[in-house]
Image: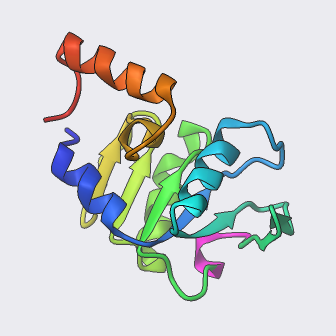
Amino acid sequence: MTTRRDIEAFLALKRIAVVGVSRQAASYSRMVFRELRSRGYDVVPVHPQAAQIEGIPCARTLADVNPPPEAALILTNPGLYGRLAEEAKAAGAAALWFRQKAPPVEGVAVVSGECPMMWLRGAGWIHRFHRSLRRWAGTLPG
């Protein structure tokens, strides 16, 4: 189960591989990528078919991220989560964030099923509102 401590520990890391950044500028993954970048994170887009995202060279796989990532944000199809978790660990990531429910992963910190935008300070009103709704419903990690 994801805790607030897991989330804060992930967000304290600065070099983050963002796996599954879309080539479509208006996508959710691009919004998250841009937001992390605007906040000073050293984000590395990982996409097997894109040469670059927003002017930043893409790594084709997590093993290609150099220097290695401290963490990996996984925004792909959940069917790829297991393989990507192992690749991220092998690449040196100490923490993983899965947008949807994560598989069991040993040896790294895991954030599962949370929207990163809800946890970034000063996020847009819709993300703050969503977080408030979850707090009121009692489903926000404590």
- Where does residue 45 sit, x and y in percent of width and height? 67, 64
Instruction: Give the main secondary structure of the magenta stretch.
Output: helix
Vertical side of 58 occupied by 138: above or below: above
91 or 114, which is in the foreground? 114
**Vertically, is 129 above or below 55?**
above
Instruction: Say whether residue 5 is left or right of residue 14.
Output: left
Instruction: State the image quarter where residue 10 is shown.
Output: bottom left
Left or right of 78: which side holds 132? Answer: left
In front of the other: 92 or 56: 56
Q: Position of residue 136 (x, y in %)?
A: 21, 13
Q: Is-magenta flag for residue 62?
A: yes
| Residue that protrudes farthest toward the left in the picture | 142
In the image, 129 versus 107, the foreground residue is: 129
Q: Is residue 39 above or below residue 102?
A: below
Q: Quadrant of the C terminus?
A: top left
Which range is magenta? 60-64
